[in-house]
Amino acid sequence: MFKYLKNYLVLILFLLICSARASAEEILSWQDCIKEAAKNHPDLIAAVEEIKQSEAAKKITASALFPQIDANLNASTARTASDNQPGTTADSYTYGVTGTQLIFDGTKTIQDVKAASETIKASQQNFRFTSTQVRLSLRTAFINLLKAQELIRVTEEIVKIRKENYELITLRYESGLEHRGALLTAEANLAEAFFELAQAKRDIGLAQRQMTKEMGRKEFIPMSVKVDFKVVDSADEKPDLESLVKNHPSLQQLIAQKNSAEFSLKSAYANFSPTLSGTAGANKGGTHWTPRGDNWNLGLALSMPIFEGGLRLAQVSQAQGLLNQLKENERSTKDGLVVALEQAWVSLRDAVETVNVQYKNLIATEERSKIAEAEYATGFITYDNWTIIEDNLVKAKISYLNARANALQTEANWIKAKGETLEYVKT
């Protein structure tokens, strides 16, 4: 008896220390976590940089439509000599500008610019898709931390139940009303409750580390989260899944890639057209600095491919194959998203209803436990019957917690399946 009283006092001291530490923890709401992740998460930052690369690539491609002007400056000296003749030195200086303007290339460059524009759209949709993934990971970490916090409270209740059970059985054992097996079982249950409480304390640290990662923090700071175990986006009525799929970022990304491939195919066909460019230049040259001789030129340059070993035909075939591939990928992705949405909705509804069932089961088990405890204390039921009821109460508390956490997780999965981004505020 004294041994377990001592353990209990040590546990109380441990809880007081943890409570003091918890008071220094940072308390975060869901919106706090969203704001921090949106600013600091490396995956989102990388996705933004990908958009910038796509925008720069478009500017590079479009630059071919503008005049290309170069400036030049040359200075040289040369010495010549022959047999029995003194050498002579000649200097040469030139400077000027030259320019080239694309006039016609069969709309190849224009098609390339349009393809680049669609690539930007694909990068933007990739950012949205990354945001949905970040939201799911962040929400999962948030739920895990919330569950870990609640698990400590639940296991503390279980410790209290097991301790009271142990004290009651000890009194009955010392009075000769209970056998030693019951006492040893009560001791084992109390020891298990202490272990589960200590385990729950350790799990808090892991959940905090996970939150630190998903918020994009560089340094670890102990934290706790505040929110109710309440599913907001419960989807009581089944939505139009086909409509939801249309705006999904993964599908929109494929559509943009397909459009880009269509423009690339047109560009490949335009590659068979002649290319016409205008050229102009003006420079000064002479043997002394500053040169005074004026030179200028104007001209047109026309080029047309005749034979390149089938290069352009192969480019067209490659572009056509990519377009066909992306069309089929789009169809496959759309079908897969509809199935994923259906599955996510079914899981969400099952999880929400499971919470209600587990809550009723918990209420019934708590009431049955109160009655059974009184009956056991007065000898109306045996230890074997009573301990089964107490074990059911412990299981019901854990099951209810798991059901609530699972409902939040399935809600997060449902929101991810809809393609909602980090800024989705319904929860």
Image (cartoon, rainbow, N blue to C red):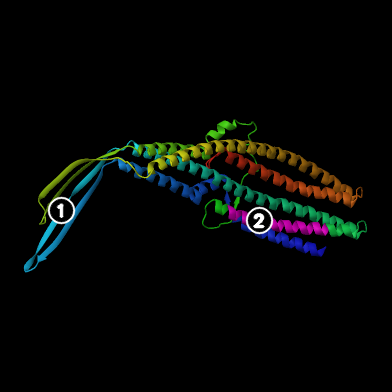
**Residue behind mark 2:** 203
The residue closer to the viewer here, 45 or 186, is: 45
Is 8 on the left-hand or right-hand side of 28? right
Residue 196 in the magenta stretch? The answer is yes
Q: Amino acid at mark 2?
A: Asp
Circles 1, 2 touching at the beta carbon (< 8 Å): no
**Residue 51 % position (x, y):** 43, 45
Q: Can you see residue 324?
A: yes
Magenta span: predominant SS is helix
Query: What residue lies at 61% left-to-right and 42% top-to-bottom?
Result: 413
Q: Secondary structure at mark 1?
A: strand
**Residue 418 % position (x, y):** 57, 37
Query: What residue lies at 66% left-to-right and 56% top-to-bottom?
Result: 203
The residue closer to the viewer here, 336 or 273, is: 273
Q: Can you see residue 25?
A: no
**Residue 305 % position (x, y):** 32, 41
- Mark drawn on residue 381: none
Judge the density around disc 2: few (<14), some (14-19), many (≥20) Cα neighbours within 10 Å. some
Q: Amino acid at mark 1?
A: Thr
**Residue 50 % position (x, y):** 44, 47
**Residue behind mark 1:** 94
Is 39 on the left-hand or right-hand side of 59? right
The residue closer to the viewer here, 113 or 186, is: 113
Residue 34 in the magenta stretch? The answer is no
What is the magenta range? 186-210
Q: Secondary structure at mark 2?
A: helix
Give the CA distance from mark 1 to mark 2.
77 Å
